Image (cartoon, helix red, strand yellow):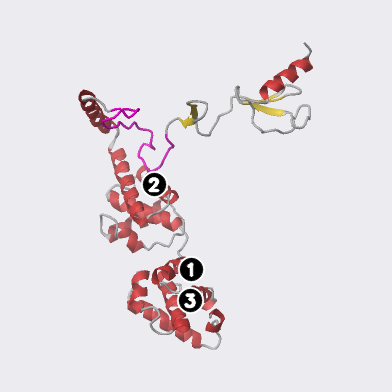
Amino acid sequence: MSDSDSVTTSTADVETEVSDQCYTCPECATTNSVVVDASTAETYCTQCGLVLADSRLDRGPEWLAVNAESERRVGGPLTDLRHDRGLSAEIGYRVDGRGNTLPGGKQRQFTRLRRWNAQAKFESTQDQNLARGLGEIQRIASSLDLPDSVQNRAGRLFREAVHAGLLTGRSVEAIATASVYAACRLRRLPWFFEEVAERARVDEPRVRAGYKVLNRELDLAAPPPLPRDFLPRLASETGVSTEVEQYARTLLDLPAVAALANGRKPGCVAAGCLYYAARELMGYGAVTQDQLAATARVSTPSLRTMWRTLTDLAAEDDVSFPSPSEFD
């Protein structure tokens, strides 16, 4: 058999087992001749036989073929919300893997195994604090209905805090709550610090101190919250119309109004613009100051002061506020 025949035969055998990654061979300059053999993990040219790479690492998930119709993943995915990243064993209760009820002796044996397994999970006090804090993060994130990506980010922040020794002299619950708020800040989610801190098992000053430590020691570089980030949430919770929300967003885009946000809470600025827009478009009583202030987590006098500042700003000649007729 000639070399060309052997190459043709091997190519035919490999084509069913290779991926569609093809490019030009650097040796013979043949286009679309480089293939990847899935059985040997070799990347080679089918024309000249040059091996470009071998022993490749498959960084994707592992799969175990159970039968011809289905496949099953080997092990669960890694997660940052478990102290051991989800690699520990879990011993079940009362039934085996096929759903059959275990006899009483086996159940008592598995009870002892669960107790020994729980004692062997933590190699040090650091692991115990890590498991305790990650559980607290899951509890707070569940009460806030945060997405999985934010929970994982908070878990990574808390893990970094533990490895950096930031728990020394501080409460685990405070650092865990601060990690949740820091993850929300990094994702620009419109959550107020007060409503995250009120779900903690420690008082608010300790959570605030924990967030300052995370921000300083881990160099979070969290973007500053903007009033426009809180506007959709305030408009939704107060039930104002879409026109009022659009008018308030237009006010927030004005340079003169943006300058008012310096030194003020972004939620207060957004609430003041929303109240001003509601008064201009819908008149008095469209939304009460107490309702809007409670939603924005600010005091009613602060909201009233912001509204009066906007009213004075609109009366100035060098500042042009949009006309309410444009949003009717």
> What residue is shown with label 1?
228
Determine if the magenta segment contains residue 160: no
Q: Say above or below: 178 vs 107.
A: below
Residue denoted by label 2: 155
- Asked if the residues shown at circle 1 and circle 3 are in contact, with their CB atoms under 8 angstroms apart, the answer is no
Number of labels in the image equals 3
- Residue at point 38% right, 55% down? 145
Q: Is residue 55 above or below residue 223?
A: above
Of callouts 2 and 3, the N-terminal one: 2
For marks 1 and 3, the one nearer the N-term is 1
**Magenta stretch: dominant SS?**
loop
The structure residue drawn at horizontal position 29% and vertical position 51%, both measured from the top left corner, is 173
Which secondary structure lies at badge 1? helix
Q: Position of residue 22 (x, y in %)?
A: 70, 33
Q: CA distance from mark 1 to mark 2?
A: 28 Å
Who comes first in sequence, dot 1 or dot 2?
2
